[in-house]
Image (cartoon, grey):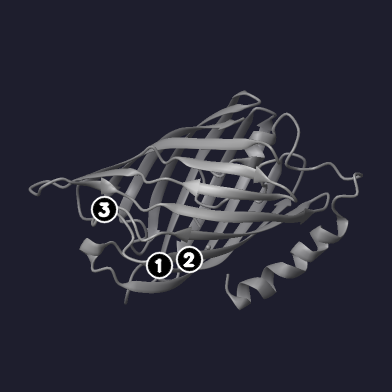
C-alpha cells in the first residue's frame, strides 16, 4: 500500500490540473461508474491504489490472502489483508486498514507470528477528462502492531495517482509518492525515507474481466539500504457488479523490497 515530494507534485500536477478543468460538467462519462465500476474503484490486488474514490454513501471492503517465499529461505502467510473504504462528500474517501495476521516459517528456526500496524488515510479524486483521471492521498500508519511486524513509529505516506486510458479497454496508471517510515521493533525500529514509483497496465477484454501487470519499487528499503523493485500481475473477475474475486502473482526484480522472492495471492472486493 502506497506514498509526494515537491518533485512528485511538479511531475503530476499539470496533468491533474487538466483533468480538474474538464470534470463535473456532466458531458464526460465518469470513469469510476458503470457496470464495471468496481474494477476501477478497487485498490487490490495491485500495490498501487486506484485513482477512483468510493461514491458518497457507499463503502468498499477488500480482503485477501498471500503466500510468499522469503529471500533468506522459508515462507510467510499474510491475511486477511482487509481494507475498508468509505465514500465522503466532494469526491473524497476515508481509508481504514486494520492489522493483518502475519506468520513466518523459517527452517531450523522458531516460527514468528504477529500483527501488522493499523493504517488510516484520506483520498481526494481531483478530476477527470475523457482519458485522464487524477487523485491525491495521504496515509498514516500508527505506531502499533506486534514487535516483529508492526511499526515502531508513525509512518506518513503521500501519493499522487494518475490514470490514462490508452484505448476503450486498456489503461496505464502511475503512482508516485514518498514515505517516512520505521522498521518493526525486532528489526531495530530505524526510520528511513523513500520515493516510491509504481506503473500499472490493465486490459479489460470483457466488462466483467480485467488483467493487469505492475512494476513497483522504493528508493530505500530500510535504513542504510538501497533501492528495491518488484513486479506482479493477475486477473480480476466480477461475479456480480458488486462482487469481485482476483488472483495475483508477484516476483522480486532487484534489491529486497518486501523480503520475498515470489508470492501468490487471492482475494475479493465488495461494494455496499
Residue 50 visible (yes or no): no
Q: Residues within 10 Å of mark 1 (few under 14, many from 20)?
A: many
In the figure, residue 180 lies in which quadrant? bottom left
State the SS at label 2.
strand
Identified at 12% across, 46% down, the residue is: 107
Which label number is shown at residue 85? none
Mark nearer the N terminus (2 vs 1): 2
> Quick check: 218 left or right of 126?
left
Q: If the image is split into quadrants, where does the C terminus sit? A: top right
State the SS at label 3.
loop
Residue 139 visible (yes or no): yes
Tell which tag, 1 or 3, sits nearer the viewer. Answer: 3
Give the image location of residue 49, x and y in percent.
57, 51
Mark nearer the N terminus (2 vs 3): 3
Residues tagged 1 and 3 counted as in contact (Cβ below 8 A): no
Q: Which residue is mark 2?
A: 156
> Quick check: 147 left or right of 226?
left
Measured along the vertical axis of the image, is residue 176 above or below residue 56? below
Q: Which residue is mark 3?
A: 146
State the SS at label 1.
strand
Residues tagged 2 and 1 counted as in contact (Cβ below 8 A): yes
Give the image location of residue 25, x and y in percent.
91, 49
Measured along the vertical axis of the image, is residue 130 above or below residue 198? above
Give the image location of residue 185, x and y in percent.
24, 63
Q: Residue furthest left?
A: 108
Measured Cα–Cα span from mark 2 to mark 1:
7 Å
Q: Nearer the viewer, residue 101 or 218?
A: 101
Q: Nearer the viewer, residue 170 or 148?
A: 148
In the figure, residue 42 lies in which quadrant? top right
Q: Which residue is mark 1?
A: 181
Amino acid at each position: 500500500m502506497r506514498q509526494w515530494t515537491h518533485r512528485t507534485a511538479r511531475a503530476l500536477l499539470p496533468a491533474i490540473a487538466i483533468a480538474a478543468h474538464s470534470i463535473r460538467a456532466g458531458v464526460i462519462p465518469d470513469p469510476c461508474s458503470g457496470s464495471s465500476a468496481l474494477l476501477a474503484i478497487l485498490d487490490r490486488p495491485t500495490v498501487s491504489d486506484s485513482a477512483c474514490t468510493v461514491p458518497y454513501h457507499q463503502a468498499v471492503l477488500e480482503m485477501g490472502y498471500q503466500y510468499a517465499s522469503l529471500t533468506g529461505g522459508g515462507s510467510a502467510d499474510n491475511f486477511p489483508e482487509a481494507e475498508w473504504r468509505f465514500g465522503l462528500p466532494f469526491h473524497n474517501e476515508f481509508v481504514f486498514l486494520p492489522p493483518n495476521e502475519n506468520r513466518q516459517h523459517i527452517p531450523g528456526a522458531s516460527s514468528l507470528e504477529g500483527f501488522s500496524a493499523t493504517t488510516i488515510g484520506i483520498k481526494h479524486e481531483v478530476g477527470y477528462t475523457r482519458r485522464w483521471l487524477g487523485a491525491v492521498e495521504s496515509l498514516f500508519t500508527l505506531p502499533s502492531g506486534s514487535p516483529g511486524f508492526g511499526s515502531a513509529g508513525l509512518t506518513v505516506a503521500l501519493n499522487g495517482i494518475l490514470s490514462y486510458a490508452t484505448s476503450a479497454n486498456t489503461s496505464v496508471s502511475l503512482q508516485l509518492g514518498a514515505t517516512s517510515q520505521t522498521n518493526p521493533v525486532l528489526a531495530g525500529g530505524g526510520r528511513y525515507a523513500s520515493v516510491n514509483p509504481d506503473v500499472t497496465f490493465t486490459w479489460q477484454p470483457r466488462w466483467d474481466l480485467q488483467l493487469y501487470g505492475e512494476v513497483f519499487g522504493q528508493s530505500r528499503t530500510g535504513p542504510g539500504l538501497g533501492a528495491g523493485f518488484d513486479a506482479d500481475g493477475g486477473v480480476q473477475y466480477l461475479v456480480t457488479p458488486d462482487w469481485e474475486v482476483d488472483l495475483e502473482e508477484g516476483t522480486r526484480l532487484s534489491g529486497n523490497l518486501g523480503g520475498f522472492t515470489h508470492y501468490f495471492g487471492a482475494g475479493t472486493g465488495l461494494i455496499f
